[in-house]
């Protein structure tokens, strides 16, 4: 019974922290506000996470792990069909997992989307935490971009991937706002978003 309560408390802290970090950023979110809204005491936060920085890392890791795993799995499937897949296929493999994580996060979907967008644009050293957590798929996708776009240098491919990420972050940060690309977390909305992003980004990557 104790373990169940402990898991529930940890999850509640993560959910509240995710929402507050998404709304207010790292600097604008205090542990006091997390404690108050999660209805826990300071010792519970320190027990599970130790500090605000580690709480931020835990929130980020909860999202980043399935995103990176999904990106690597989709890329492997893509390259199993064609060792040199089209840039559209590589982009679809890269973009779909973050949106699927949102789709699978249920009531947290909009908070998850906005946190995913916000955490990657935090200033250092907090930004480095997010970068580290999402780093696992970057090399594999740079390699795939290199095979699909062989006329570009590694440096050019790196900033092209950075621009893809920046576009995706903008879409995530604006989720569910008026005129935003993502208006709900249904499978059809997610697929439509992926298709629009792939069509938009592919032409830019080739130029």
Image (spheres, rainbow, N blue to C red):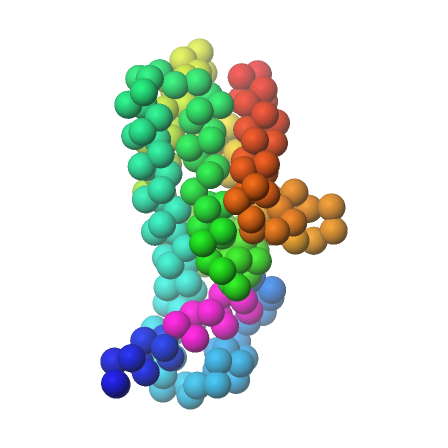
Which residue: 38% across, 59% down?
62
Is residue 27 in sight in this rendering? no
Q: Range of the magenta residues?
A: 11-20
Q: Position of residue 135 (x, y in %)?
A: 36, 44
Looking at the image, residue 134 sits to the left or right of residue 76; the answer is right
Q: Position of residue 139 (x, y in %)?
A: 33, 33
Specify whether residue 61 is in view. yes
In which quarter of the view is residue 9 placed? bottom left
- Direction right: furthest residue: 178
Seen as rendered, the residue at the extreme top is: 151
Q: Nearer the viewer, residue 48 or 191?
A: 191
131 or 111, nearer to the observer: 111
Q: Position of residue 156 (x, y in %)?
A: 47, 23
Vertical placement of 76 versus 28: above or below? above
Residue 146 sits in which quadrant? top left
Q: Nearer the viewer, residue 133 or 87?
A: 87
**Vertical side of 107 occupied by 43: above or below:** below
Q: Residue at x 54, y 37 (%)?
A: 191
Q: Is residue 16 magenta?
A: yes
């Amino acid at each position: 019974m104790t373990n169940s309560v402990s898991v529930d408390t940890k999850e509640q802290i993560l959910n509240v922290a995710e929402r507050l970090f998404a709304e207010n950023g790292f600097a604008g979110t205090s542990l006091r506000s997390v404690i108050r809204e999660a209805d826990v005491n300071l010792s519970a936060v320190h027990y599970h996470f130790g500090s605000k920085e580690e709480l931020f890392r835990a929130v980020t890791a909860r999202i980043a792990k399935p995103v990176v795993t999904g990106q690597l799995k989709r890329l492997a499937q893509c390259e199993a069909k064609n060792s040199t897949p089209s840039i559209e296929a590589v982009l679809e493999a890269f973009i779909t997992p973050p949106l699927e994580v949102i789709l699978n996060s249920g009531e947290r979907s909009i908070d998850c989307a906005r946190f995913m967008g916000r955490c990657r644009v935090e200033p250092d050293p907090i930004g480095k935490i997010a970068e580290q957590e999402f780093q696992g798929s970057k090399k594999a996708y740079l390699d795939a971009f290199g095979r699909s776009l062989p006329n570009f240098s590694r440096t050019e491919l790196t900033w092209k991937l950075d621009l893809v990420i920046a576009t995706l972050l903008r879409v995530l940060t604006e989720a569910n706002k008026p005129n935003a690309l993502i208006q709900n977390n249904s499978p059809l909305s997610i697929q439509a978003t992926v298709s629009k992003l792939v069509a938009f980004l592919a032409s830019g990557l080739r130029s």
